[in-house]
Amino acid sequence: MLLRKTILLALVSALCAAAFFAEVALAAAGKDYYKILGVSRDASPQEIKRQYKTLSRKHHPDKNPGDEEAHERFIELAQAYEVLSDDEKREIYNRYGEEGLKNQGGPGGGAGFHDPFDIFAQFFGGHVRFDRRGGGGRAKPRGPDVHINVPVTLLELYAGAEIEVDISKQVICPHCDGSGAASPDDIETCSTCGGSGMRIIKQVLGPGIVQQMQSTCDACGGKGKKVAKPCPLCKGTRVRRDADVLSIKVDPGMRDGEEIAFEGEADQHPDHEAGSVVVRLRQQPHHTYVRDGDNLHAEVTITLLDALVGFNRTIRHVDGKSDISLRRTGVTPPGYVQRLGGKGMPRRDQPSRERAGDMHVTYWIQFPRAIAQDETKALEALFGSWDAAKWDGTTSKAAKRSGSTHSGRQAPSESKGHDEL
């Protein structure tokens, strides 16, 4: 009898061991999403999110043009995050591996995954083009969006940049996972409402007349549960403050006031889904250039001699590296505007620098403070009888007949040959 029991226990143990190792082998098959993200199997959701943000930026195709290996790695990171950031999918993956996800109809075969660039945009911003509150039939109400202004330079809008912004936000307590209790055993059914979250209130209005009303239970706040022992970390509030970093990708040609949304990055709470952090770009003044759409405007002061005989000089481009050659021959009137085609801001729908906006350079003349007496006669001899142009906008009949008139400030003039950098 004892021998029979021993043999039976051995068989049960062998079967359990076989089932366990079969499950482990099945879970080990396919891609190791933990290894892809570089986290342990017991990594917290915050660790998984932080690691994805770090690695996805490093392997983004825009940072590694022509590198197919980096592109494949970027896709794998998005797939790994999509599985491990979802509690249900993560549980299935932990037990049955990638094959288990396929059998459950979830991601795993490639076609079931979301676009990796959409997942990346959740962390690093997507341009606001619609009301993100609509659609979806959310199980929880959506929390408010948070709007912040981020200063950017004209150079960053011209060349593009990645800007990191430190933020402080409310997050769900990692110790109690938003329950507010020290442990799951410290959550009790509300004795007042019996766990329904509602109370029935009866009020006698008169003989034989009773009014019955239903209201939210004030003892548990309508939750049906009460916390016997609060969480030592959040003190029962279910949330705490935490620091985070947003990485803002500024594309070349973006404009002042443009908004970038980071979905799900606003304050968290167990009772609602986190809203978006909406970043509004605010361009700082530039010491040389003023932006107008895709065009740039600059003002340059020249001497009276330059205005009369012409000049050849340079100004530093907005990129801070190259010089723009400014050449003029002959007379340059005050307020004259020279247009330099293709020297303005890049157009986002036309990334080629040849299709950029224009630069408009306005010339102003620095007149001398005084003229010596002996130089006055020479100037009178040179200019005294020439009245072809009147700077106040009026012209003589002779000037009108000859066509040699100036009215002061000029409209933008096409720069011949488009001065090269």
Image (cartoon, rainbow, N blue to C red):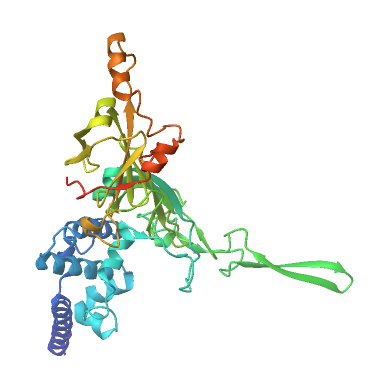
Which quadrant of the rendered structure holds the C terminus? top left
Does residue 233 show up? Answer: no
Classify 110 as above or below 36.
below
The one of 276 and 92 positioned closer to us in this rendering: 276
The one of 293 and 218 positioned closer to us in this rendering: 293
> Count of labels shown?
0
Residue displayed at 41% across by 37% down? 398
Which quadrant of the rendered structure holds the N terminus? bottom left
Residue displayed at 45% across by 52% down? 146
- Residue 304: quarter of image: top left
In the displayed structure image, the side of residue 272 where residue 406 appears, left or right:
left
Does residue 385 show up? Answer: yes
Please state the horizontal and vertical placement of residue 334, each as a whole percent of the image.
Answer: 36, 33
In the displayed structure image, the side of residue 111 where residue 225 appears, left or right:
right
The one of 335 and 2 positioned closer to us in this rendering: 335
The one of 87 and 21 positioned closer to us in this rendering: 87
Please state the horizontal and vertical placement of residue 45, each as a whole percent of the image.
Answer: 30, 60
Residue displayed at 58% across by 67% down? 197
- Residue 314: quarter of image: top left
In the displayed structure image, the side of residue 367 where residue 70 appears, left or right:
left
Q: Residue furthest right?
A: 207
- Residue 346: quarter of image: bottom left
Please state the horizontal and vertical placement of residue 267, each as a whole percent of the image.
Answer: 43, 53
Residue displayed at 23% across by 67% down? 78
Q: Which residue lies furthest to the top in this view?
A: 373
Please state the horizontal and vertical placement of residue 165, each as a whole percent of the image.
Answer: 32, 46
Classify 371 as above or below 284.
above
Classify 272 as above or below 233.
below
